[in-house]
Amino acid sequence: MSIIKLLTSSVGRKILMAITGLLLAFFMAFHLFGNLFLFVGEEAFNAYVNKLHQLGFLIRIAEFFLVLFVGSHAYSGILLWIKNRKAKKVVSSYSKENTPSAARSAAFTGSIVFVFLATHWSTFWYKFNFDLQGMSYYYVVTESSVGFGSPAVSIFYIIAIALLGYHLKHGIASAGQTLGIVGTKYESIYDNLAAIFWFWIPLGFISIPVWFGFLVRII
Ligand code: HEM
């Protein structure tokens, strides 16, 4: 089977989704680590972003791959969703009861995550790279109207990232099956690591809009 045929088959698409999804989850761990400098303070966060930007071209290459992974993950997901819908119409015994709710809603949560990422890039990423207007990076995130200075943005981030966690819960379990980890001696290690990525890391992200969007203004 040629590589093109493999990648465009259902199995190939599932493998591609599993690998790109897991790589994106690893990126989230790295991204959260950087964002947690917000809690250290303005100087620390700005210094971290400046260090990152000093990597210049390397960052652009990493961003290119991130967009490629998000794009191919979403594209394969949409094609598989369409195929499953068609199959559902043919197999009449297929009912809501035998489909895990997370799997059924993966397309919905995935779409919200996609909207979240498009918003996130066109605001934070764009401002950081092309429209800083002398503002501090810390200020853009914690005070500006595209950041957590706006309660609407904060609420949007909290809901979208919670849905992202839910999407990952299903996605990581599904990737474990696709990659043949389920049923092996590594399954329990995989499940424990999965919880870090679908629960703890999203919770870490959520703590940022909760704190800077609301708590810091009340306390
Ligand atoms: C409170 C939550 C978050 C904050 C404060 C935040 C902050 C930022 C900032 C400031 C940038 C621009 C970085 C730069 O160009 O120097 C960025 C970029 C990015 N963010 Fe987030 N982010 C958050 C959540 C997320 C989540 C949940 C994802 C999901 C995967 C994500 C994915 C990305 C990606 C892919 C980029 C572009 C790559 C990059 O420039 O690092 N972010 N984020």
Image (spheres, rainbow, N blue to C red):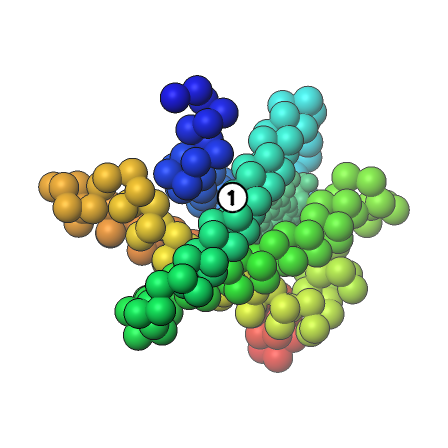
Report the residue marked by disc 1: 76
* Residue 51 image point, x, y percent: 63, 31
Viewer-nearest residue: 132 or 76: 76
Label 1: which secondary element: helix
For label 1, the crowd category at 10 Å Cα-Cα, with few meaning under 14, some 14 to 19 and many 20 or more, is many
| Quadrant including the C terminus | bottom right
* Residue at 84 percent of width and 45 percent of height: 131
* Residue 91 image point, x, y percent: 35, 63
Please identify the residue farthest to the top as the structure is shown: 2
Residue 163 in view here: yes
* Residue 144 image point, x, y percent: 77, 61
Viewer-nearest residue: 93 or 181: 93
* Residue at 48 percent of width and 42 percent of height: 24
| Quadrant including the N terminus | top left
* Residue 175 image point, x, y percent: 34, 45
Q: Quadrant of residue 67?
A: top right
User: Please, is residue 113 above or below residue 3 in the view?
Assistant: below
User: Please, is residue 71 above or below residue 105 in the view?
Assistant: above
